[in-house]
Image (spheres, rainbow, N blue to C red):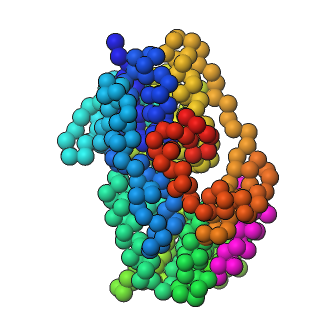
Amino acid sequence: MTHTVVILGAGHAGLPAAHSILKHQAEKFDLKVVLVSPSDDYYWPIATPRIIVPNQMADDKIFFHIPKLFEKYPSARFEFVHGKAETWNPDDNAVLVTLNDGSSRTVEYHTIIVATGSSAQAQMPWKLLDNSKQTRAALDDFRRRVRDAESIVIGGAGPTGVEIAGELGSAYAKLGKKSVTLITSNSMVLEDRIMTKVRTEAMAKLGKLKVNVRTSTRITNTTEDDDGATTIQLSHSNGTNESIKADLFIPSWGLKFNTGFAPASLLEPNGRFKITDKRQAPGYKNTFIVGDVADGEPLQIMFAETHVKHVVAALEQYFTGGEIPKYVPRTWSGHVVSVGRDYGAGEVAGWKLWGWLVWFLKSRHLGTNYAPDCAEGKRFVTLGSI
């Protein structure tokens, strides 16, 4: 009897998981992969800091139609379900899905891989919105607002905020066309876990782009005014307060995990899934958790892909009744941050990277030069071939 493997989510974890199983295990173990996603496009959010700037990059560089990506596999081995998981009952091995046309369907499975990922706060398109149609509309609106704004403030100076500021600085601030301000509550841009040398370099490169970086400043409130501008309340580390106004305010902080369909008993207080040392849900050996929704590791693509590689390899033992190996966490990580079209800063395994190398690896194209290969299942983003 054909064994059904359901994969929830078609992002940087779910999509390569589906490709990997179909390429290496579907025929061998008589599997059918059912990929469930509210979007019928695979989204490349790595490039969104540049694509929100008008006339910089076409949308077809970041959207890839999922049904077309899987046409090469036999229909008996693959099905795409265009819908959103609403209720999951792991005891019954079933997921209730609201389909794109508004109807509902119960999808049953023998094995499930949960890879539903995370969403950006405030409906920002740094992650896919509910579906690709909404995401495309949000990007169109962003480009219009960027075009019309004379003053732009970005809240939060993590990698996303720095990359947005860099793109806006490249296109406008360094040319004197718009004022661009980046605000962070920390004393430097980027996260504390990133090398100080890298953070210092990123700040210096933002300065070259004429981005005004305001450190040790917390945004306490924002109010949209009648004229469409935003009033931003600031609190400084010295105890003083300030109010500024911007034609466009861009929040770059905060993620929420897409786990609202799951039983509360399977979730940690932070909203991510509890997991065993084999990347299974506790008490459910037929359930694997990968990507941002899995608790315990940073929210980076390289970790999500490491999860996928482990789970797909472990399925060899799983389908033959063998002992599933324990997950071996990564002992190193890397951070590469684009700072506009011409600059970058980064580190790998505790080694600072040359700026020109970060430019070559990321800043030139923001991954759109190899995004089609990732979408088609030829390679991972960070871990080589699938």
Task: Please check the rendered image and state whether residue 38 is part of the magenta-colored stretch, yes or no.
Answer: no
At horizontal 44% and vertical 16% (from top left) the residue drawn is 29
Total labels: the figure holds 0
Q: Could you say where residue 77 lies in the image, as x and y percent from the top left?
A: 36, 25
Residue 286 sits above or below residue 195 on the image: above
Give the residues in magenta. Answer: 193-210
Which sits in the foreground, 378 or 302? 378
Our reading of the magenta stretch's main secondary structure is helix
Q: Is residue 96 above or below residue 126?
A: above
The quadrant where residue 341 appears: bottom right
- Point out residue 140 in the picture as x, y percentages from the top left corner: 37, 69
Question: Between residues 311 and 44, which one lies in front from this camera angle?
Answer: 44
Residue at 52% x, 11% y is: 321
Residue at image coords 43%, 80%: 147
Residue 215 in view here: no
Q: Residue at x 61, y 83 (%)?
A: 174
User: 250 and 362: which one is in front?
Assistant: 362
Left or right relative to 284: residue 132: left
For the C terminus, the quadrant is top right
**Placement of 281 over or under 204, stated as above or below:** above
Quadrant the N terminus occupies: top left
- Residue 199 part of the magenta-drawn span: yes
Q: Position of residue 60 (x, y in %)?
A: 40, 58
Q: Position of residue 114 (x, y in %)?
A: 45, 35
Whether residue 31 is visible to the viewer of this picture, yes or no, is yes
